[in-house]
Amino acid sequence: MDLLKDGGRMILAFKNTNAYDKTQYDWICDWQFVQRTKPEVLDLLDNLGIGVDMVTTTRDQSGIILFCEITRRSMD
């Protein structure tokens, strides 16, 4: 979180592993597409020191993309 100033925000996007087939991404890209569920994403962020109190989640209209908005609270 040191990368964000007080009040700063970062938005991350993840594809819900239960909502699509990753096969085409593995075939057309020179990297492995890592799938995650919402609990796995929140665990990943928590392991990075980003607590759930700092994260607001929303989804796109399709329900496939999970957006995580991380806000650094003021240290006052």
Image (cartoon, grey):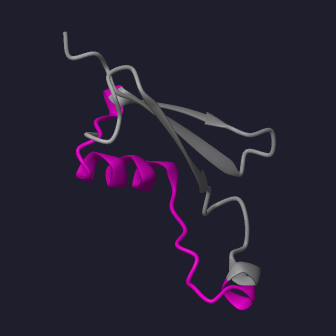
Residue 21 relative to residue 67: left or right: right
Which residue reaches farthest right? 61
Residue 72: quarter of image:
top left
Q: Nearer the viewer, residue 68 or 23?
A: 68
Q: Which residues are magenta?
A: 26-53
Quadrant in the picture for the C terminus: top left
Residue 48 x %, y %: 26, 51
Q: Is residue 52 magenta?
A: yes
Residue 44 relative to residue 32: left or right: left
Quadrant in the picture for the N terminus: top left
| Residue at (67% x, 49% y) in the render | 65
Q: Nearer the viewer, residue 38 or 6?
A: 6
Q: Looking at the image, is 4 positioned above or below residue 47?
A: above
| Residue at (46% x, 30% y) in the render | 9
Residue 27 x %, y %: 72, 90
Residue 63: quarter of image:
top right
Residue 6 x %, y %: 32, 22
| Residue at (62% x, 89% y) in the render | 30
Residue 17 relative to residue 47: left or right: right
